[in-house]
Amino acid sequence: MIRIILALVLLSSTIAFSQEKTFEKEVRKISKKIDQITSQHKDSLKQKIKEVNLKLKKNEITNEKATELKKNAASYHAKQIELNAGIQEYKLQQLVQDKVDGKIASEDKQDGVRVSFFDKDFFVLRTNKKEKKKIYNKRTTTQFVFAMGVNNVLENNNFGSLNSSDYKFWQSHFYELGFTFKTRFTKEPSKTYFKYGISFLWNNLRPKNNQYHVEDDTGVLLEENVMQLTESRLRHVQMIFPMHLEFDFSENKTLSDDTVVDNTHDGIRLGLGGFFGFKLGTRQYLEFKNNHGTLVEELQRGDFNMNTVNYGLSGYLAYEGIGVYVKYDLNPLFQNTSTRNISLGVRLDLN
């Protein structure tokens, strides 16, 4: 019995030792995951294009519709690759940081690449050709940005008007997906940065009291529908260019030679600024059951008297990569009105 227990312990120890995490193993895992993500979405896109071509061949759709479907499919899968691969790239950056901090071990040698020197401040990666690279103290870094939260409107810039808003507060959502650059103002390490980039926004407004948006010669109005609506949602999509003055209070690092280098997204961050951009499109989604009890889904396209150009103020308070986020449009949402969009939510910055 003792021999069996000893054998099991020895076997468990061997398995645990063989599964010990190393820097190189984790890098290969992440690299393989990125390849899988890219391959899966490319295969899915090829299949969708094949299906569209088949419908076109059978004359079920026109050439214009086929082109539109292909463009939409390509855009969707490109965004999915960017989103999912960006998450893996963030994991890779965190893995490198763990290696720099000595939190993960390294293999002595793997595939002709040898890690010859690591300390807590920076690393030198040496290949068989004796090439060296030092990575630290970048003045400009990049971030993948994702934000989501609740969306509503103010009347006459009055926050009290939220209490009497015609839109549902918790059911009206916004989503933001973007890419930013973060540049230090000075060559030397500091706490002040200029953050700028591009984002795409999906703003949704859901009216209360069975109402929906109606456009006429005087503008756009909210009216009660004769049918009992199970869904009433106005969505407007925007492309914006955000710009923020960011104060990053992360503690800088000191190298072994007493050189001070920059360290970002490792503490409290405060961003203050604004944005300008353009509306790319507006749609209204309605759902209801007709007199026969059949569920009807209705999609309405139009500008709904919305202003094309939009601009406003925005800010965030974060710790490391996650924080609270607020955005307020200074220009009216609809023409000839005092209705302005306001958004509040959470923001994720993957450095």
Image (cartoon, rainbow, N blue to C red):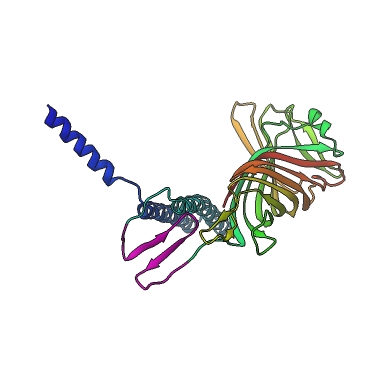
Residue drawn 73% across and 29% down?
A: 208
Q: Nearer the viewer, residue 291 or 77?
A: 77
Tell me if residue 280 can be seen.
no
Question: Foreground: 9 or 216?
Answer: 9
Rendered location of residue 176, percent (x, y): 64, 47
Residue at point 74%, 26% (across, down): 209
**Residue 128 on the magenta span:** yes
| Image quadrant where residue 108 sits | bottom left
Instruction: Determine whether, in the image, residue 128 is placed left or right of residue 312.
Output: left
Image coords of residue 45 (percent x, y)? 46, 55
Horizontal and vertical percent position of residue 94: 48, 50
Q: Position of residue 270 (x, y in %)?
A: 69, 46
Quarter occupied by residue 167: top right
Above/below status of 202 relative to 24: above
Give, as a single range, the part of the protein colored magenta.
Answer: 108-133
Q: How many marks?
A: 0
**Residue at horizontal 43%, vertical 53%?**
99
Q: Quadrant of the N terminus?
A: top left
In the rendered image, the vertical position of residue 258 relative to residue 209, given as above or below: below
